[in-house]
Image: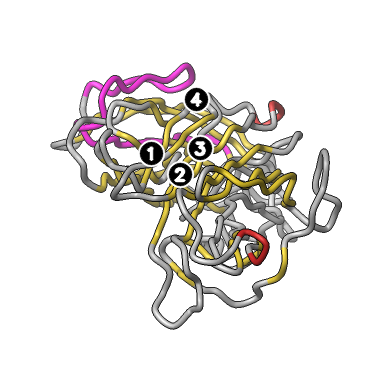
């Protein structure tokens, strides 16, 4: 049976600034082997600033179960809404015939051995119009068998879609791009700034280092007295640097601490598993994925510098 893999596309740890708590969601994830062939579409980053760059990734993994063989005649298509500007790809060709409202890219992959993964990318520029945009994808292939590689069932098709939400360049609560660094603003309306600087693991072959940052109000009754800061990054070989700046503190600085919130994401404000974030100097000590490098007074507030390790075997994530 052909099915979508149900393993998590994101690993979402988070930080909570305790005393007055704040959370930081880290995004990365991995995949394991699959008996059935799988296909997925990712749009990175999932939160994107108007005018900034992003990319679509199509990922096909050939079946690896008993009796599986090479998948042949593999063709992937990626349909980007025409609102996503300047679409381009080094490995896929613009199609002469696209669905209404979309720009189609066709990726002629050919052969994918059992258990192996083929990925294709299309880059784009976010429009000025703030909205959620959906990219559709499909992959068609002949499913191989162990006894007759490439000679199994014919014309198997898998479909999938991915989304990104574009925010105005003046939005102070969300920022995302493909440059490896992003930051929200510190204003009278947004008393908290979150910034990220990261470099993607070069072995992943990504078109760019996608990142996003933002803040959310704490859920009622949570005991969190500041906004919740979250960030997203791809897997990294060296820790990313996250800086959270507070214009003011609701408790004395001496009572202000950083805690880890492992299950938080913007779409799933789960605050369970909160724990104090360990301190460090240069890198998180495994199994920790993040650590507090410094926490210092900043005017009437404070500034926390956090090191964050993006982990996982595949840059497929969701927020």
Q: Residue 233 falls in which quadrant of the image? A: top right
The residue singled out by tag 3 in the image is 211
Of residues 47 and 299, which is closer to you in this image?
299
Q: In this rendering, does residue 65 appear at all?
A: yes
Dominant SS in magenta: strand
Relative horizontal placement of residue 50, taking residue 180 as reference (left or right): left
* View extreme (bottom): residue: 221
> Which badge, 3 or 4, comes first in the chain's sequence?
4
Where's the N terminus, which quadrant?
bottom right
**Mark in front: 4 vs 1:** 1
The residue singled out by tag 1 in the image is 185
- Pointer 1 with pointer 2, Cβ within 8 A: yes
* View extreme (left): residue: 100
Residue 171, percent across and down? 28, 42
The residue singled out by tag 2 in the image is 193
Q: Which residues are magenta?
A: 72-96
> Which badge, 1 or 3, comes first in the chain's sequence?
1
Query: Distance of mark 3 from mark 4, alpha carbons?
Result: 8 Å
Q: Residue at x 13, y 37 (%)?
A: 100
- Pointer 1 with pointer 3, Cβ within 8 A: no
Q: Is residue 234 above or below residue 159?
A: above
* Dot 4 crowding, Cα within 10 Å, few <14, some 14–19, many 20+: some
- Pointer 3 with pointer 4, Cβ within 8 A: yes
Q: Residue at x 72, y 50 (%)?
A: 292
The residue singled out by tag 4 in the image is 179
> Which badge, 4 or 2, comes first in the chain's sequence?
4
Query: Distance of mark 4 from mark 2, alpha carbons?
Result: 18 Å
Whether the magenta-drawn stretch holds residue 122 is answered as no
């Amino acid at each position: 049976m052909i099915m979508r893999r149900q393993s998590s596309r994101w690993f979402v740890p988070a930080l909570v600034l305790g005393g007055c708590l704040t959370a930081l969601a880290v995004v990365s994830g991995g995949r394991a082997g699959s008996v059935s062939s799988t296909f997925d579409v990712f749009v990175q980053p999932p939160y994107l600033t108007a005018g900034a760059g992003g990319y679509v990734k199509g990922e096909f993994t050939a079946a690896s179960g008993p009796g599986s063989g090479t998948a042949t005649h593999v063709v992937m298509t990626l349909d980007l809404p025409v609102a996503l500007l300047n679409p381009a790809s080094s490995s896929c060709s613009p199609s002469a015939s696209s669905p209404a409202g979309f720009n189609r890219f066709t990726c002629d992959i050919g052969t994918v051995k059992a258990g192996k993964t083929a990925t294709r990318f299309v880059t784009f520029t976010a429009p000025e119009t703030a909205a959620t945009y959906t990219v559709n994808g499909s992959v068609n292939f002949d499913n191989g068998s162990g006894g007759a590689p490439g000679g199994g069932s014919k014309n198997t098709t898998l479909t999938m879609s991915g989304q990104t939400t574009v925010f105005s360049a003046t939005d102070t609560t969300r920022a995302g791009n493909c440059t490896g660094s992003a930051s929200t603003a510190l204003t009278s309306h947004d008393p908290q700034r979150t910034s990220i600087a990261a470099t993607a693991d070069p072995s992943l072959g990504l078109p760019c280092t996608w990142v996003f940052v933002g803040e959310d109000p704490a859920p009622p009754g949570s005991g969190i007295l500041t906004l919740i800061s979250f960030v997203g990054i791809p897997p990294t070989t060296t820790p990313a640097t996250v800086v959270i700046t507070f214009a003011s503190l609701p408790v004395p600085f001496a009572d202000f601490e950083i805690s880890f919130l492992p299950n938080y994401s913007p779409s799933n404000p789960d605050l369970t598993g909160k724990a104090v974030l360990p301190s460090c100097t240069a890198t998180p000590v495994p199994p920790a994925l993040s650590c507090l490098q410094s926490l210092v007074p900043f005017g009437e507030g404070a500034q926390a510098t956090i090191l964050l390790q993006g982990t996982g075997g595949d840059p497929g994530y969701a927020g």
